[in-house]
Amino acid sequence: MEAAETTPTEAPPARRRVGPAAALELHAGLGALAGLVCTLLWGVTDSASFWPLWVWFGIVLSLALHAGCWLAWGWWRGARDRRRGAVAAHAAVSLTVVAVLAIVWVASGPGGEFWPLIPIACLVGLLAGHATLGELWVRFDGRAREHALTDRVDELTRSRRGVVEAQAEELRRVERDLHDGAQSRLVALTMQLGLAEAELADRPEAAAKVRAARAEAGAAIAELRDLARGISPPVLADRGLAAAAQSLADRSPGPVEVDASGLDRRPPPIVESAAYFVVAEALTNAAKHAPGAAVTVTLAVDGETLRVAIRDDGPGGADPAGSGLTGLRGRVEALDGALRIDSPPGAGTAIEAGLPC
Amino acid sequence: MRVVIAEDQALLREGLVALLAANEIEVVAQAEDGDGLLRIVAGHEPDVAIVDVRLPPSFTDEGIRAAITARERHPETGVLILSQYVEPVYTAELLAAGSAGVGYLLKERVGDVPAFVDAIRRVADGGTALDREVVAQVMSASRRGPDDPLAALTPREEEVLALMAEGRTNAAIARALVVTQGAVEKHVTAIFSKLDLPASDDDHRRVLAVLAFMRSAS
């Protein structure tokens, strides 16, 4: 698996955003060129009236219309919701009309009454009316209010997911830094101590001291390794959820069976990470409250949902408000997932999580 | 003995070179990524390639992949993987990839110089060198079911089993446990009989047999 498959692909390069801007620039460039050519021609042919004025007028007008469309489209796309988008587009169109009126007034010979004033006042009034009415409508019309709320919820979900992803990325970076930094230095240290110990072969007491120092360094390495695994296990990023779950199973004191046959694709890393920590926490709980009980972990992708189930046949009676399980709920719900805990006393415990993926 | 090293961290790479030189092992070439490793193995045909699991460009498991490819293309070159973490899943992949001459050790084991050098020689000779952490994990995983397949073994036999799974020769096991080689051979026979495994003179094959047994029991 190449790295590109294991990390989510970045948003497709922003080619669409470059397109319209480039088109406008092209338009402006060609227009300027045409205008200059005509002006040069006029200079060469020496006619009476400055006819290139009309060429320039046409060019500037078309540019203004083009820019207006582009602005309207950009403001509409960039708006937080549909209602604001409509107001923004209206504003852009009004600006364009104002610009066109101003250009016409200038081209018809500046000086004299500024007749566009009245149309401009009407446009401003219309825009203000649109914005106000939109605001009032949302307050008093239930469906409009609902649309506004839905849009806000979508925006919040997107930003929350962004926060979770940023956090996971940060943890991966910490694990890498630990690996490349402190852990690697300690390994180099054990190497040097090992070499020193070999050189002290003729002084057993000194050699014993060096060996003890090496053992301490080894203990530090092991602790850092466990720490790193607790925040961002390498096997999860390298081999995926099934392998990482099996690794958890291998490390737990009681018998744990992992069935990942329903996992036909790798979910996005952020979902894999949440699922991994659900399994880790559930297994820790099982080891603590149901030692020796047989545990089964099932992982499957069902359409658009990753389903994680951890079941044990222990004494049951798990407290869903316990700190470990509430932490689990937080992780799952941060990604719009659902967590269910079934733990009737005497009938084992079942933890099931569904994560959209 | 001639070895090559693939390690992207200069501090560790230089430390390894110094350590090996002090033990009469010649490092004929060094590389910093997977492609570099394949090039120097092809070019120098060393006895052993010592490879870090995590190499550029992805810094995930480039090293394992390159090592498996090297084993396929150059079956005569032993491969010793060094890692700051061991995962049984990588062990399984390495063992599946070819015949003898494979090792998987935690990086910190290089501090125990005699044992590290012994592991390299074992891999160069076509044998196996698995980290005792990996063996311990596989062993404890195998005992967690309702029946403990290793229940019939005495504590001493368990120790011998673990050292066998690491790929050590009978002589090395005898040295480690400070007993005679004859005693070790007796233990080995008893173990194979109790676990109902076919006896084997080949150290590498018995590693595979033991690991396969423990995997199937877990």
Image (cartoon, coloured by chain):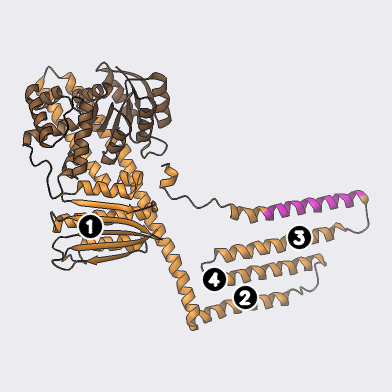
Q: Secondary structure at mark 1?
A: helix
Question: Residue A147 in magenta?
Answer: no
Q: Amino acid at mark 2?
A: Leu
Is the residue B173 above or below the residue A100 in the image?
Answer: above
Decide if residue A229 is on the left or right side of residue B58.
left
Question: Residue A42 in magenta?
Answer: yes
Q: Nearer the viewer, residue A318 or A13?
A: A318
Residues marked 1 and 4 touching at CB (< 8 Å)? no
Quadrant where the image shows the C terminus of chain B = top left
Question: Looking at the picture, how far across and down is residue B17, in whole percent?
Answer: 31, 22
Colour of chain B as rendered: brown
Question: Looking at the picture, how far across and down is residue A357, in whole percent?
Answer: 40, 58
Is residue B133 visible to the viewer in this orientation of the structure? no
The magenta segment is A23-44
Please give the residue where the numbered disc 4 appears in the rendered image.
Answer: A82
Between marks 1 and 4, how big is the CA–CA gap?
Answer: 43 Å
Quadrant of the image occupied by residue A62: bottom right
Q: Secondary structure at mark 4?
A: helix
* Earlier residue among tags 3 and 1: 3
Nearer the camera: disc 2 or disc 1: 1
Is the residue A25 above or below the residue A194 in the image?
Answer: below
Between marks 2 and 1, how big is the CA–CA gap?
Answer: 57 Å
- The chain coloured orange in the image: A
Residue at 51% across, 67% down: A80
Nearer the camera: disc 4 or disc 2: 4
Question: Looking at the picture, how far across and down is residue A79, in whole percent?
Answer: 54, 66
The reply to the same-chain question for discs 1 and 4 is yes
Nearer the camera: disc 3 or disc 1: 1
Please give the residue where the numbered disc 3 appears in the rendered image.
Answer: A60
